[in-house]
Image: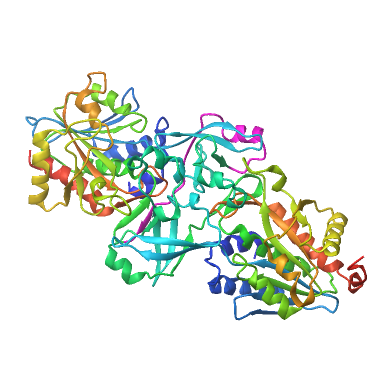
């Protein structure tokens, strides 16, 4: 399967943090032809093993996504919502959603119409508590089909924009899962000594728990966490955002400097452009928890720039995604046990 | 022509050509005379069986609210203004189609991670919103979407719930759809169906249609805001989706003719057509043009507005009940057959 087809399918699936079963099954099946062994652990981490006898590497990208849950069913059948992870309430009014009740139901997020609001109310954003899901059916039927706690996913669309740019939901972080997938494809035609684990992790959006679990169980020598970062958008501070059309590698105390240096050297040798982001503290990615597992697993962070992160229209550059896979594959081939001597210089 | 096709056509006020062409083609086989007037309105006439009866005019507007490209950022994003009233709060993170070639685009906004507390409170208005079509720079954006290019919500017609539908432009493609269906029937009197332009920017097209007509009775098919769910207090609920066609005693642009206001609900009741009285005077529509011609003195008809109640009108995902759409048509047919 072409990586674009994988990306299109995997971004369409619901996988709210804690309810990642369906997307984990899909990813495991897609990874299987390219790995010696693929398993899904108890918490929905997908672990693909490509065997080798060199250093053990773990590459991970999270498969869970931010989203919404039903928190209350009103008298008139409207559903109230709570978010899981950082959903921007500004994107919600007028958004279609899928409610995973007894069966899958289409709904629309509604709010009080602007002509019924005071001037003062119109000048403020709708808050989550002002919004509701309209399922277009009478209240008794809603109560029969839906219960509090049911998953609500944002509208999933995959749109090809100009210049190989894609707008889709859940590019955070399934686009990086697609990098893992594509790197596994590329590695079939390449020689590597390293013992490789490609891991799609669960529960990142609430604290990178899947990365901690898997780094503990796999116990790799080194790791690369893959996640998304911010591309330039109007109004955003330009020193915290990056060009859409090249990869980013963060530097700072939460990123291991030797692994990052090796990653940057590999990029240079293979003519892959990588931008640098400076992160003074937590990176809020799987890299943070991997670096402190099992007494310390030296881990670097490779990032794919996205516009409009945590909306339903996250925009990425397909060429950058491909470059990410190329870098990861070359890094896997470059890894040596001798790196151990350079760990702390 | 079905409602799906009609709502998925893009026809922002001032750019109704595609909708007009599609309607003209669909209406022609059922009409005695089809023409386009100087205001771009599509006028379809059909003879009745009894020439002694007065002609009845019907109107629905072809245009929908949308966007127009008004500038660019250096990195190739399209600056936009709304055409017609679209609350900027409902367009963040939505999909659009730009220009006649339907280039896909999205309305982005700065990620929540980068927003300050002040940003989170501030409403993104049209000076802060833009369409991203993936252009690399200003030159490419200008070439792909020159100034003045129109953009529309990209929404697939989606049945959902119990006999309901999500679509864009239900205001007023439901009216266009029903006028087409009306033209397929035969009636005692002559009828004229006007598919008018530019309702959303000030009832402009219908002024031309009123000028060109000499009718005694004009019935306007609309989609109207229902406000029947959620946190709307009882006093502001004007009609209910799923409870039938809404008849207006008055709105912001016209006063309903008293005889018609009494007659139509009575006809509906005796024929078993779901019908409700709109409990408020919000909004204004083309009935104003036919009643008094805007400020031109063109119209002099007795008017009545028959509305399909819609939720989330003027957003990319408006909602209506299919039974209400049918009720609008059936009540008009009942009226014609009882003249």
**Residue B116: where, in percent of width, then height?**
59, 47
Front residue of this view, candidates B315 and B40: B315
Q: Quadrant of residue B298?
A: top left
Question: In the displayed structure, would residue A224 be above or below residue A323?
Answer: below
Q: Residue B108, can we see it? A: no
x 61%, y 58%: residue: A171
**Residue A308: where, in percent of width, then height?**
59, 49
- Type of colouring: rainbow
**Horizontal relation, residue A38 to residue A345: left or right:** left
Question: In the displayed structure, would residue B316 be above or below residue A279?
Answer: above
**Horizontal relation, residue A327 to residue B64: left or right:** right
**Residue B257: where, in percent of width, then height?**
13, 33
Q: Quadrant of the C terminus of chain A?
A: bottom right
Magenta highlight on residue B157: yes
**Residue A204: where, in percent of width, then height?**
62, 67
Front residue of this view, candidates A280 and A272: A280
Q: Quadrant of the N terminus of chain A?
A: bottom right
Magenta highlight on residue A160: no
**Horizontal relation, residue A108 to residue A261: left or right:** left
x 8%, y 31%: residue: B53
Question: In the displayed structure, would residue A8 be above or below residue A245?
Answer: below
Q: Quadrant of residue A45?
A: bottom right
x 60%, y 53%: residue: A309
Q: Residue B147, can we see it? A: yes
Figure label count: 0
Which residues lie in the magenta part?
B133-161
Front residue of this view, candidates B273 and A147: A147
């Amino acid at each position: 399967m072409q990586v674009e087809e994988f990306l299109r399918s995997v971004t369409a699936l619901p996988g709210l943090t804690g309810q990642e079963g369906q997307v984990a099954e899909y990813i495991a099946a897609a990874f299987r032809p390219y790995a010696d062994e693929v398993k899904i652990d108890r918490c929905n981490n997908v672990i693909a093993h490509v065997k080798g006898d060199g250093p053990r590497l773990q590459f991970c990208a999270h498969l869970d996504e931010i989203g919404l849950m039903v928190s209350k069913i009103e008298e008139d059948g409207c559903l109230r919502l709570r978010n899981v992870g950082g959903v921007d309430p500004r994107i919600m009014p007028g958004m279609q959603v899928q409610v995973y009740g007894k069966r899958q139901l289409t709904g629309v997020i509604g709010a009080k119409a602007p002509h019924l609001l005071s001037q003062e109310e119109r000048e403020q954003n709708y808050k989550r508590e002002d919004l509701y899901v309209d399922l277009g059916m009478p209240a008794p039927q809603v109560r029969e089909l839906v219960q509090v706690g049911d998953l609500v996913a944002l509208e999933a669309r995959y749109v090809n924009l100009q210049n190989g740019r894609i707008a889709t939901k859940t590019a955070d972080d399934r686009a990086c899962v697609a990098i893992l997938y594509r790197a596994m494809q590329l590695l079939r035609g390449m020689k590597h000594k390293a013992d490789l684990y490609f891991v799609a992790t669960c529960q990142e959006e609430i604290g990178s728990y899947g990365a901690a679990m898997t780094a503990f169980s796999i116990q790799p020598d080194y790791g690369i966490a893959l996640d998304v970062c911010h591309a330039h958008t109007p109004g955003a501070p330009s020193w915290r955002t990056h060009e859409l059309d090249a990869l980013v590698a963060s530097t700072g105390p939460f990123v291991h400097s030797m692994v990052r240096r090796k990653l940057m050297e590999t990029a240079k040798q293979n003519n892959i452009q990588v931008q640098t982001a400076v992160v003074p503290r937590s990176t809020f990615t799987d890299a943070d928890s991997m670096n402190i597992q099992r007494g310390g697993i030296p881990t670097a962070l490779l990032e794919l720039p996205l516009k409009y992160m945590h909306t339903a229209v996250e925009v990425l550059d397909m060429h950058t995604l491909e470059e990410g896979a190329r870098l990861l594959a070359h890094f896997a081939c470059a890894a040596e046990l001798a790196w151990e001597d350079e760990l702390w210089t | 022509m079905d409602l799906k096709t009609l709502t998925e056509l893009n026809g922002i006020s001032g750019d109704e050509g595609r909708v007009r062409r599609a309607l003209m083609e669909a209406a022609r086989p059922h009409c005695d005379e089809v023409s386009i007037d100087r205001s771009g309105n599509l006028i379809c006439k059909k003879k009745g069986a009894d020439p002694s009866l007065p002609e009845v005019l019907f109107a629905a507007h072809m245009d929908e609210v949308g966007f127009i490209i008004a500038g660019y950022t250096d990195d190739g994003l399209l600056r936009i203004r709304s055409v017609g009233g679209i609350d900027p709060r409902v367009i963040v993170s939505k999909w659009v189609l730009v220009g006649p070639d339907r280039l896909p685009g999205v309305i982005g906004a700065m990620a929540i991670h980068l927003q300050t507390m002040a940003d989170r409170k501030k409403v993104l208005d049209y000076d802060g919103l833009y369409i991203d079509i993936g252009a690399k720079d200003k030159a490419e954006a200008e070439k792909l979407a020159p100034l003045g290019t129109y953009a529309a919500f990209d929404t697939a017609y989606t049945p959902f719930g119990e006999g309901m539908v999500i679509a864009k432009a239900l205001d007023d493609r439901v009216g266009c759809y029903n006028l087409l269906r009306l033209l397929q029937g035969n009636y005692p009197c002559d009828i004229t169906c006007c598919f008018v332009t530019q309702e959303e920017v000030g009832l402009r097209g219908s002024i031309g249609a009123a000028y060109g007509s000499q009718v005694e009775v004009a019935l306007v098919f609309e989609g109207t805001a229902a406000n029947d769910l959620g946190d709307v207090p009882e006093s502001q609920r004007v009609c209910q989706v799923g409870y039938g066609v809404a008849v207006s005693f008055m709105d912001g642009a016209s006063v309903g003719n008293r005889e018609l206001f009494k007659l139509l609900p009575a006809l509906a009741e005796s024929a078993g057509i779901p019908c409700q009285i709109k409990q408020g005077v919000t909004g204004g529509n083309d009935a104003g043009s036919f009643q008094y011609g805007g400020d031109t003195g063109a119209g002099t008809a007795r008017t009545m507005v028959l509305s399909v109640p819609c939720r989330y009108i003027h957003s990319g995902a408006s909602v209506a009940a299919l039974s209400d759409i049918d009720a609008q048509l059936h009540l008009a047919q009942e009226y014609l057959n009882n003249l």
